[in-house]
Amino acid sequence: MPAIVLVGAQWGDEGKGKATDLLGSRVDYVVKFNGGNNAGHTVVIDGEKYALHLLPSGILTPGVTPIIANGVVVDIEVLFEELDALISRGVDVSRLKVSANAHIITQYHRTVDKVTERFLGKRQIGTTGRGIGPTYADKINRVGIRVQDLFDENILRQKVEGALAQKNHLLVKVYNRRAISVDEIVTDLLSYAERLRPMVADTALLLHEALTAGKTVLFEGGQATMLDVDHGTYPFVTSSNATSGGAVTGSGIGPNRIDRVLAVVKAYTTRVGAGPFPTELFDESGEFLRAKGFEFGTTTGRPRRCGWYDAPVARYTARINGVTDFVLTKLDVLTGLAAIPVCVAYSVDGVRHDEVPVSQSDFHHAKPIYEDFPGWTEDITGVRTFEEPAAERPGLRARAREDERRPHLRDRRRPRPRSDRLPARPDQLARGPGRRV
Ligand code: IMO
Ligand code: MG
């Protein structure tokens, strides 16, 4: 079955680009279904490093058709910049298709993003400043500009007028900024229309036809489960659905077409921007992870907040996304540690929680309960199977055992019994709420 959804299991930057790259040639289409150029994938191919923000990382795989679907917010200037950078390095980008229904990030969205953050002061989200939130807000408010609007100047002008009528009041009277002119925006947007035109398509129909023809389609989620606007640590989230459900609404395929849901999880945890993070480290262990894992934002260059692996978050991700497979990344960063603490549950005011608490205040107060796993010292970067000697070390074995409870990426081609294909059941994973520690 050909539809695979790939999501981030934590707060982003889990190495989703690398997982996409591993699936590589087995995939015919790669679809970005949420977010915009707030994402950041660093992919290294043949020693060449590519940093992508808006384009799905699958664009680097020869023969793959990359798709920017309706759930994405598109900054067209960034789109062309990224395309030009790839073209100059000899990457074939001619297959790219962009949904006619995707919303457009304009200059006023970027401006509003920055001024709102400034006005939030201490309550800042720490957004990437790319205009993501304001563009989704306009979409929900029904004053957004869509890709298809670029091809009808009258409609475009009306829509921009509608959007700016409100926004200019806000910018001038509340934020003390200059008003943005309708002409300026319309001229800017129209200047992209002709180059964009051949890329624009009914991508929902295209995907329907591809799946019907038995093609393999990878839906590549931007951001991650804990940054999802519904299921993440609201309000410290992004403004889209980064979970597997977002792949359905964000691309226009039916939920029953999805066969596999892969979640990419890092062997420790990182977060950029504000919001709760129970296993965050403020000591030299955090510094160790940041330096060794090179945890600095691809998009904004900010140092990432670092902490130990959080199992309740992975459990939550398994449940919310219907995860069928986990891809574990950056295990080698932990090499050399005598013991590896893993958060197995939280203590909230003395009460044990095996699940992510539903109350935001509780999550803010959650203290990790750690179990130590023995570490290893040998280089594991060349290890490819769990049978190799280095993988026989106790710490790795413990980790491997956890992994083996789920079908693994490497087993993808092996036929499996029906029961094995069901997502992990949350009631089998949970040990009941509210036990005292
Ligand atoms: P990838 O795809 C990590 C975070 C921002 C901020 C919050 C809201 O590389 O994993 P936004 O600009 O989206 O309104 O910011 O979400 N954020 C990310 N953190 N990785 C990302 O993407 C992120 N995209 C947004 O730091 O806290
Ligand atoms: Mg990133």
Image (cartoon, rainbow, N blue to C red):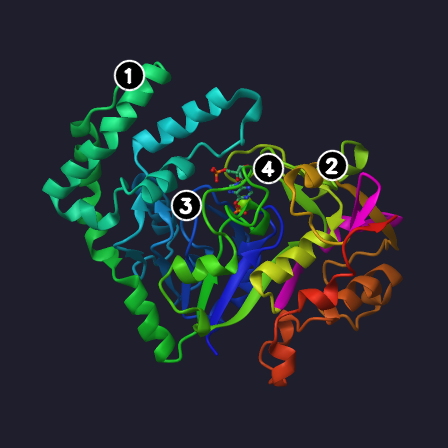
In front: 401, or 196?
401
Q: Give the spatial CA distance, label 2 vs label 3.
A: 32 Å
Horizontal arrangement in the rendering, residue 365 relative to residue 27 (left or right)? right
Residue at x 58% of width, y 80% of height: 413
Query: Left or right: where does residue 259 sit relative to residue 272?
Result: left
Identity of the amino acid at label 2? His
Query: What distance separates the C-alpha of mark 4 from that of mark 1?
Result: 31 Å
Q: Amino acid at mark 3?
A: Gly
Which label belongs to residue 36? 3
Secondary structure category for the residue under label 1: loop
Residue at 33% of width from left, 57% of height from top? Answer: 93
Image quarter for residue 172?
Answer: top left
Q: What's the distance in space between the residues labelled 1 and 3, CA to CA?
A: 26 Å
- The image's mark for residue 365 is 2
Labels in figure, total: 4
Residue 356 image position (x, y, % from top left)? 69, 50
Query: Height in image: 110 above or below 136?
Result: above
Q: Is residue 329 visible?
A: no
Q: Return the mark for residue 178.
A: 1
Q: Looking at the image, is mark 2 or mark 3 nearer the viewer?
A: 2
Give the alpha-carbon distance from disc 2 to disc 4, as whole Å: 19 Å
Q: Are marks 2 and 3 in contact (CB under 8 Å)?
A: no
Residue 272, disc: 4
**Discs 1, 3 touching: Cβ within 8 Å:** no
Q: Mark 4 near ligand 1 (CB under 8 Å)?
A: yes
Inspect the magenta stretch and tell me whether residue 330 lies in it.
yes
Graded by Cα atoms within 10 Å as few (under 14), some (14 to 19) or many (20 or more), the crowding at tag 1 reads few
| Residue shown at the point (52%, 48%) measured from the top left | 228
Which of discs 4 and 1 lies nearer the camera? The answer is 1
* Disc 3 residue lies near ligand 1 with CB under 8 A: yes
